[in-house]
Amino acid sequence: MYSLKGLSFNKIYNHLIIYLGLAVPMLSLVITYFVYREIYDKYYVITYFLMALLIYFSLSTIKNKKLFQVLLFVTTFLFSLLSIIEIVHLDTFKTIINSSTIYIVLESNLSESTEFVFTYANSFIFALGVLFFLSILTGLVISWKQFNWMKTNSLKNFLILPSLLVSILLIFRLRNFSLPYTIFHSIQVYQEERKELSKFQITENGNFKNVKHTNDEQETYVLIIGESTTRNHMGIYGYYRETNPLLKQKLNELYIYKNVISPATFTIESLGKVLTLGDYDVPLKKYNNTLVQLFNSANFKTYFISNQKPLGAFETGVTLISKKSKQSFFTNTSGNVLDEALLKPFQKALDDEFKSKLIIVHLLGTHYSYEKRYPSRFKIFGDQPNTKFKREFVFRTINDYDNALLYNDFIVNSLIEKVKSKNTKSFVLYLSDHGEEVFETRNLAGHVEYNGTEPMYNIPFIVWISDKFKKKSGRFVWDEDRSYNSGELIHTLADLSDIGFERFDPGKSLVNEQYESDKESF
């Protein structure tokens, strides 16, 4: 056998075979880099390579057979798991895993997480999973047979220690490109924020100053918050399918804003802006400057009715906001509950004779899994949809999303009808937390934080007003072409509700004559 300074090619071959469990995912990452090099920085791949070297050199110092096998299995398992998560996330969402991704996982409940996994599971992910387990099994079996090779003098050469040190130093230098660092650092920061929040006193009326509101009649204002609904799939916005037959019948009663975008493409960050004044210099301050607290300060009776689960691993920011409402209802505490479950508590809130009321309704809307968001009677769309991505799975997904939108149309219309029947001074404002990509511009159904697409930001923004409200709304400007970012919603709602406060900015109210249209729009 040919050799070079005592290290035979046969031994080099054995080196490669015994670490096959590391080589397979490493090769997959390299291939992934060349496929997605525009969004996947080379330093991520380099960091994985350094981690593989660190594992290799560390295990090379172990002479105990059982210890070696256990550590080889554990390190190969973790390395393969991290690399496959990275590859699957990149392939599915066309973006890297970052801190916000981890926050979303921490703030999601088990039901949402399970739906997420099954929604995006496909043959590619299954194949990677099989490869993952086979690589571990192969590495473990071969390590058992090749252990004598571990005792050769070639492993005791002087390069092991300096290689270990260099690998550690380089990994530390490139830690921001390391998924383990991202995970542990994000969890640490998140835990610290939750700890600080637990000490933070959230009051019923918040920190609003000089709040003024006068009213001489019964008034009821309703905010409907949708979920993962892009206006690009809504018939009322020109979509080729009739996904809004009921709202279309109300065209002469509605103001349909065409250029409204969400401040973010995922719920936590988006609603953290939509439902508060912000205060992003000190993030915790926003929990004392919420929409609910403003209306509490103006002597409204506030309701928060939600069909989303109130708790994940921790309380979500939306749940914290809802807790300061005078009454709150969570209709979805056990599983996949359809949004019509909201109608009964909504009617109860409407029947309350309190003079001034704000009712916030948080829908499950068109959240994945889309096929679970509508009853069978709304399964109308089943033909091949218009899309450039020609696969049966794509067709089925788009049809499910459009059917969910059809049901959403029924829910929103039902809520408006219930308010309308009361014949009071009232308005209903419907918008979504963010949009959704459904195989329109990218081979993807869902939403991501970075590298978001236009459909992920494009949201519906629809206002219905009662006849009694119209009589007193002459000062408002109803320009449906205005561009707007829903992160400034609190100013628009305060304006519509005749509530004044110290930090109110008419330039941020969509219906105010002083509105300043400096917001980006797609």
Image: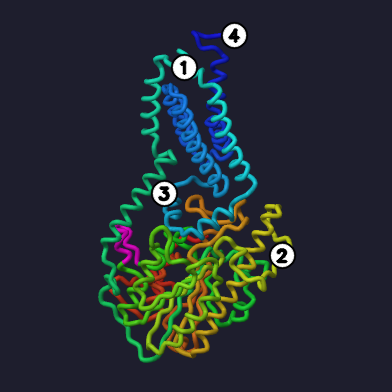
Residue 75 image position (x, y, % from top left): 46, 34
Residue 60 in the magenta stretch? The answer is no
Label 3, residues with CA under 10 Å away: few <14, some 14-19, many ≥20: some
- Describe residue 365's horizontal placement relative to residue 189 as left or right: right
- Magenta extent: 277-287
In three-dimensional space, the C-alpha distance between marks 2 and 3, rounded to whole angstroms, equals 38 Å
Give 465 or 55, whichever is nearer the viewer.
55
Q: Can you tell which of label 1 and label 3 is closer to the viewer?
A: 1
Amino acid at dot 2: Gly
Say whether disc 4 or disc 3 marks the residue closer to the N-terminus: 4
The picture places residue 427, in percent across and down from the top left corner, at 47, 81
Label 4: state its secondary structure. loop
Label at residue 151: 1
Q: Name the residue under label 4.
A: 1
Amino acid type of the residue tagged 1 in the rendering: Lys
Secondary structure beneath label 2: loop
Question: In this orientation, which residue lies closer to the viewer: 336 or 226?
Answer: 336
- Tag 4: amino acid: Met
Q: In which quarter of the image is the N terminus?
A: top right
Residue 170 figure quarter: top left
The residue labelled by disc 2 is 382
